[in-house]
Image (tube, grey):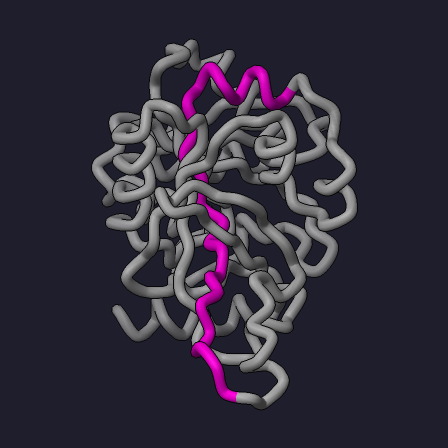
Amino acid sequence: MHIIIPARYNSTRLPGKPLADVAGKPLIQRVHECAARSGAATVTIATDDERIRQAAEKFGARVCMTSPQHRSGTDRLAEAIEKLAIGADQIVVNLQGDEPQMPPGLIRDVADKLALHEDAVVATACHAIHDRESLVNPNVVKVVRDAKGYALYFSRAPIPWPRDFMAGKGGETLQAYHHIGLYAYRAGFVRRYAAWPPCAPEEAEQLEQLRVLWHGERIIVHEAREMPEAGVDTPEDLDRVRKFFNSKM
């Protein structure tokens, strides 16, 4: 397993987010340390920003400089795979550069899941939803799986819709799953994926993983034992992460 951490400097809500101080270390270093604890063969930070490169190399990280023109982290991942000459049959995990609390064990579990399912090109994770608020929240991405654990569809909408339960008529308890945005890929597939244009469902939902299903490929979904803490998207998230790491000192 190889881990690539896409990191860009510009962010609408938190400019310079990868370099934000988190208990004496830049955020990107906290993410890198998390990745290293997973037992990955290699961990690489993929960025287009010189400031991030300098900061990463200062704490000993391997860095791959990529184009500033990429539309997504997956496109950046594809370029990094090429530059690092990672073999087509190797497993690459895309760990977002703002996920310092992603459990290292979950990173390994997702990679192992892909290794065990040769007919899948991607592996990801989910966790059971137990409350109505999460089910109807469009910021909580849901996934429906088939009988063998492969993804049928991802959506911001409440899927599946428990009709009787939501109407207050009793019925089955919620059997919905919150998608966790952690992905393991077969390296050769990432090259193909990046060459495909966005598909209509992907653009409507703003969910890149739908492009994989649109082209008839399979995504195996690992059910996590616990829901990871959210990544850093807002100043409030940054404060939460700082408090967590400060408490560990």
- Which residue is depicted at the point 32% across and 57% down? 224
Identify the image quadrant of residue 191. Answer: top right
Image position, residue 29 (x, y; %)? 40, 46
- The residue nearer to you, when weighing 53 against 103, is 103
- The residue nearer to you, when weighing 229 against 98, is 229
- Which residue is depicted at the point 48% across and 61% down? 178
Q: Which residues are magenta?
A: 170-194
Image position, residue 64 (x, y; %)? 49, 23
Identify the image quadrant of residue 184. Answer: top left
Q: Is residue 220 above or below residue 64?
A: below
Viewport quadrant of the C terminus = bottom left
Residue 230 shown in magenta = no
Residue 122 appears in the picture as rendered: yes
- Which residue is depicted at the point 49% across and 79% down? 131
Image position, residue 85 (x, y; %)? 42, 9
Q: Is residue 33 above or below residue 128?
A: above
Residue 203 placement, left or right of 91: right
Residue 173 shown in magenta = yes
Total tally of numbered discs in the picture: 0
Residue 189 placement, left or right of 100: right
